[in-house]
Amino acid sequence: MCRRDADAMGANLDIAKGREVLPKNVKPLHYHLTLEPNLETFEYEGKVVIDLDVVEDTTSISLNTIDIDIKSTEVHSGSKLIASSPKLTYDENTQTTTVSFPDTIPAGHKATLTQTFKGTLNANMAGFYRSSYKGEDGSDKYIATTQMEPTDARRAFPCFDEPALKAEFTITLIADKKLTCLSNMDVANEKDVHDGKKAVTFNKSPLMSTYLLAFIVGELNMIETDAFRLPVRVFATPDKDIEHGRFSLELAAKTLEFYETKFNSKFPLPKMDMVAIPDFSAGAMENWGLVTYRVVDLLFDEKTSGASTKQRVAEVVQHELAHQWFGNLVTMDFWDGLWLNEGFATWMSWYSCNEFYPEWKVWQGYVTDNLQSALALDSLRSSHPIEVPVKRADEINQIFDAISYSKGSCVLRMVSKYLGEETFMEGVRRYLKKHAFGNTQTNDLWAALADASGKDVEKIMDIWTKNVGFPVVSVTEDAENNSVHVKQNRFLRTADVKPEEDQVLYPVFLGLRSKDGVDEELTLDGRERSFKVKDLDFYKINADHSGIYRTSYSPERLQKLGEAAKKGLLTVEDRAGMIADAGALAASGYQKTSGVLSLLQGFDTEPEFVVWDELTARIASVRAAWVFQDDKVKDALKAFQRDLVSKKSHELGWDFKESDGHIEQQFKSLLFSSAALAGDETTKAAALEMFEKFKNGDRSAIHPNLRAGVYAVALQNGGEAEYDAILNEYRTAKVADERNTALRSIGRARQPELIKRTLAMALSKEVKDQDIYLPLGGLRSHKEGILALWDWVKVNWDTIYKKLPPGLSMLGSVVSLCTSSFTSEKQIQEIDAFFKERSTKGFDQSLAQSFDAIRAKEGWLKRDADDVEAWLKAKKYL
Ligand SMILES: [Zn+2]
């Protein structure tokens, strides 16, 4: 449980209090770990020898294990045998095995714990697990692989499974001679052992945390580059085209060199391997020197994938490589510091993308992507502070969310803007140098940044990381005195902030844009203040939206800003951010929704993709909240969307040329889909014509950039034949990205029979557990699907729960997907009643966030349903 009362979240909170950690009487120094996986029985034999520093007089050693069958245990101190079969006790709650013995090992001595054990290569994508792919003859083939973060190293072997308990590791893997064996380090030696097998021993690792260990055994193909000073390789199972790893391989080599220079720190391992894993619960995992990826996030075929897929792959690769320093070399001391890892890697991947692909203009996309997902989640009462107290292992999975990743990176962007990017990077260099191979807390980063900048960074940033939420800054004007008044209050989407939730005063960088440029110095430190503006005709707060807050203007000012946008006085980030703010403020009652619809309407001549991306997202969020409203009103909203986007879509066209830039491709794709799905006859006819050719066997008839849009249009206007054609694409396409797009689309079919088939697919053998969310996602696009999703959860709960154990974050995602699209309190009560009788451990936070999101929509509808209807009538859409 991460939830706390907001008022208990003061800045002085001792986040280390109450942590469930191992006793500190011994400290691990070195592990010699040997594992022999059997890819037929899915069992493995293991032996671990752990060298320990005895810190206090010791008669017991506690370490983490889960689902491991310990066969034998010995304890030595020096050459002396202390115990040959000591007593073992297991505590299920803390996942610890305690080894007790009668003789005391005195403080200051060394000890060695030796255990042999048996484990299972599980099918749950955690610990040491099995992952399957199809052999040439159609049979199932397996590899053994690992996912340790956050707390599943203990599922692979007995260990001191806490990030601060860094040790050195020497790994040996025993396997069939023809199989590839990989681990974090390079191979030290290979020996023939029993039954025609080989034992591969890897060189000793530097000091590292258990959650970053990895070992892989299986049949793998490989490509390699010498573009970096150390070997960089990409691996994949034989059913994949290994050449699809070329883009990631080359990018990785460039990125490693760039990071070495930027961080002024050599990558300390002897090689970098990146592996595409067929079954993978997250997107990728930054294991030191052996990064593992979901197939779609590493392998990429320029010929069959669109521009956005390429960007996603680039971001993921650069994110994982940033972790090699930030996270792996310098590690958070406990999981409440997760944001340091994830926020930084997220920020760094954008920074790096901007270096290698300046034409992608990623910092513009940041405003509509990262910033909005952070603000969306953090506007819920059930959000949590960036630095969240984490006590128990089962709480950890729930914080791998938009707060740790997106808000964390937004905070870093804010501080990098405040200090200047170069000073910020100098602080990062000092931080990495000082703490290399060690563990840190958030304050260590602030100290390094203060050191580099001479500014009191901690004082400003602590408020942002230790409190939940963010402010809305309300702006009023005094024309007579040419002055502007700003006031901050906590922002909640449900618009029901209680006084006790509105105590925190954030240091707000106002970023005042006027005709003279941007004033970066102006800040709001208290509740409110006034300042003079030379010319009230034009000004805007939060220039480029690098500050984490919403700005609420009067309707008159908003209209003026709309005009200023047309005159070219605002940047792309300003325009997109302003639309996002207006949309979010309307949804939470600060403004009327009709005002926002008018604002959107005024942007019909907008030239930039990112702004259109936000415009269409805001219309989509109104339509999603109105999904259970009267069909006439829903059709009118659709007509409004059609009117707004069609002209621009026709102007851009939907033919793709070699000369089209990265952004232009996405721009065409976005508006084509948006217009066709809103019923624009020209684009719809074009989409249906492409689909008809595709259905008749011409797979090149649909450009990769348009694939998702065309499938959606075909399903919206078709039936079983269209559904079968798309399903067939899922079943037969060779590239994971093509298959995913098909699977993601089928949920859009709304005929009852087809909805049933989609839901059955989700639980069938045809869909890997890692992809279960793909068919479900499409069902959220219509009312019939939303209702069916919830019924499906109720009926199949036990199966779903078994498939996706609560220790994995995927269960929370499925609960979210199947509940958060509702819009009324009545539906909350029904969901609540269902889960009251069941354990919500591992997803209680997702559930609470769903409820908040539903409540917010109900409030919005109550306030503005009539207002929207009146606006649609006045504009002749109704
Ligand atoms: Zn990460």
Image (cartoon, helix red, strand yellow):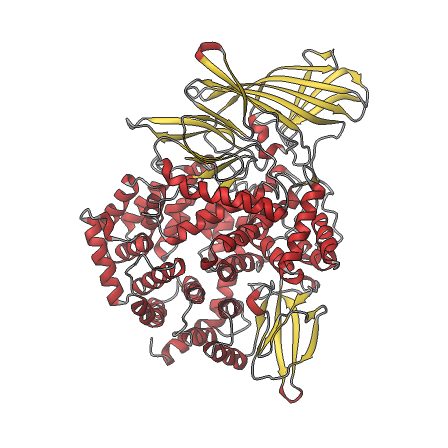
Q: Position of residue 170 (x, y in %)?
A: 60, 23
Name above or below for residue 416 compared with residue 51. below
In this picture, residue 181 sits left or right of residue 19: left
Q: Is residue 662 visible?
A: yes
- Residue at the image point whose x is 19% and y is 52% from the top: 693
Q: Quadrant of residue 398?
A: top right
Q: Is residue 10 visible?
A: no
Q: Quadrant of residue 62?
A: top right
Q: Nearer the viewer, residue 639 or 452?
A: 452
Furthest-left residue in view? 696
Name above or below for residue 76 compared with residue 219. above
Q: Position of residue 546 (x, y in %)?
A: 58, 63
Q: Position of residue 531 (x, y in %)?
A: 68, 79
- Residue at the image point whose x is 29% and y is 68% from the top: 650
Q: Nearer the viewer, residue 482 or 588?
A: 482
- Residue at the image point whose x is 64% and y is 61% from the top: 420
Number of marks: 0
Q: Quadrant of residue 371?
A: bottom right
The quadrant of the image that shows the N terminus is top right
The quadrant of the image that shows the C terminus is bottom left
In this picture, residue 562 sits left or right of residue 512: left
Name above or below for residue 564 compared with residue 187. below
Furthest-bottom residue in view? 480
In this picture, residue 82 sits left or right of residue 688: right
Q: Nearer the viewer, residue 715 or 477?
A: 477
- Residue at the image point whose x is 46% and y is 51% from the top: 819
Q: Position of residue 571 (x, y in %)?
A: 51, 70
In this picture, residue 392 sits left or right of residue 271: right
